[in-house]
Amino acid sequence: MNKLLSKILPILVLVSLMCGCNRSPSPTEGPVLVQPTQIQATLPPNPSATSDVPSLGSLKLYFLDVGQGDSILIVSPDGQTVLIDGGDGGTGVVQYLRDLGIQRIDLMFATHPHSDHIGGLVDVLNNFPVSKVVTSGQEHTTSVYEDFLDGIDKSGAEYVEVGRGDSVSFSNFTFEVLSPRNNSPENLNNGSLVLRLLYGKTAFLFTGDAEEDIEEELRRTNQPLDADILKVGHHGSETSSSRSFLNAVSPETAIYFAGVGNSYGHPDPKTINALTSAGATVFGTDQLGTILLTVSQDGYQVSSVQQEAIVSPVAVVPDALSTAPAISAGLSNISVITYTSNGNTYSQENLFQGEIMIKAAIDRFEENMVVIILEQDDKRVEVPHNLLPEGAREGHRILVEFDGEKVTRIVLDEDETALARERIKAKLERLRRGEHRTKAS
């Protein structure tokens, strides 16, 4: 903490002298996030050009603003690249990489197979050469996950599955894998890869969407949790960042991913309070956009990368929303489908007279809603929990009834779920055996 104070104190003094009119938030506005020590108005130089790397050798970590999802780009002093997650598909990760001059990804981690972490990885696999892809081996039966497996296959990237006790080399550094010990098919968040990286005197902990159960297990089994930089679990949700876990990590700096005005109430104000009580300075992509950490052998600096404007000097955690929207917009181009079960084909009219039904899958359960993925175009739709039939699980293939743009009914499609599971197992086995690389070579 002393080294962090030594960095930010001179800046705070300067800001107070120059901007004495800065307002103080009222108690109703929620916890305040301490601002970065440096603000940059333009993108930094091309990080993939090794000639631009300072003589001391800087490690750069970009916490990319991909809305309500995670994506971290790491660029080593010798120009090698790591991508940890990619946000949802179509949220800009490809353009971010191109703007930064990145030409290839040397190492890709998918912490877990929810769409807000792997959707953008599909885009990257389809647009950049990728050398190695690392997962925990968790399976999911959404169309997005199937697209992810197809993207790895097409890319010819080496495919590796890891778990607790493994390590993954990158440039001259090593990621320690602290979790999962076992995959968690009932809760994909708890099967997230939890990674620890040490660079010089600075330690990083990347937790994916791991929740309190896993945090407690990591603490109880004496995993090396202490870290200067913490990637906050599950977008700052109340399901993660327990006080006992944060005390074990003792982070100086905590960074969370969340979309502006998101419908999940992320980050939860209780999580921000817990982080600040643990002594962390908190930064969020919903407040600052893309966040850059520049790390030397002796310490690190935090800055906010904005393409057009310098960020506001005051940042307040948004209040959690009490209700979720019924569905996402933009469904006008969805066509009516037919449904085949046990050899019988039914038209949309046979199932729900006068309504529209489409194929979809349950991607994930959030605290206040369920996220489903439409099969036709991987569009995300948010629905209330009470619309799900009994027995619905993450990954279940479903049929969704629409009345205009309102979801009115959901039916489990057990036959399609079984077929999807068989396809995905076959694709995973092909990747595990490396058959896709033989074809690519």
Image (cartoon, rainbow, N blue to C red):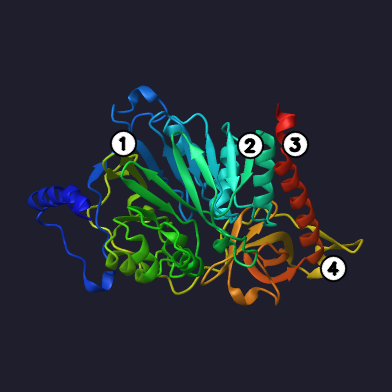
Dot 3 lies on which element?
Answer: helix
Please give the residue where the numbered disc 2 appears in the rendered image: 158
Q: Are marks 2 and 4 in contact (CB under 8 Å)?
A: no
Residue 408 occupies which quadrant of the picture? bottom right
Depth-wise, is mark 3 or mark 4 nearer the camera?
A: 3
Residue nearest the viewer, comparing 331 with 382:
382
Look at mark 4 in the image and give the residue it sits on. 350
Residue type beneath disc 4: Asn
Residue located 36% across and 70% down the image: 243
Secondary structure at numbered mark 1: loop
Label 2 element class: strand
Percent position (x, y) of residue 355? Answer: 74, 67
Quadrant hosting residue 437? top right
Whether residue 268 is visible: no
Quadrant where the N terminus is found in the figure = bottom left
Image position of 68 (left or right of 317): right
Which of the numbered marks, if any, corresponds to residue 42?
1
Q: Earlier in the sequence, mark 1 or mark 4?
A: 1
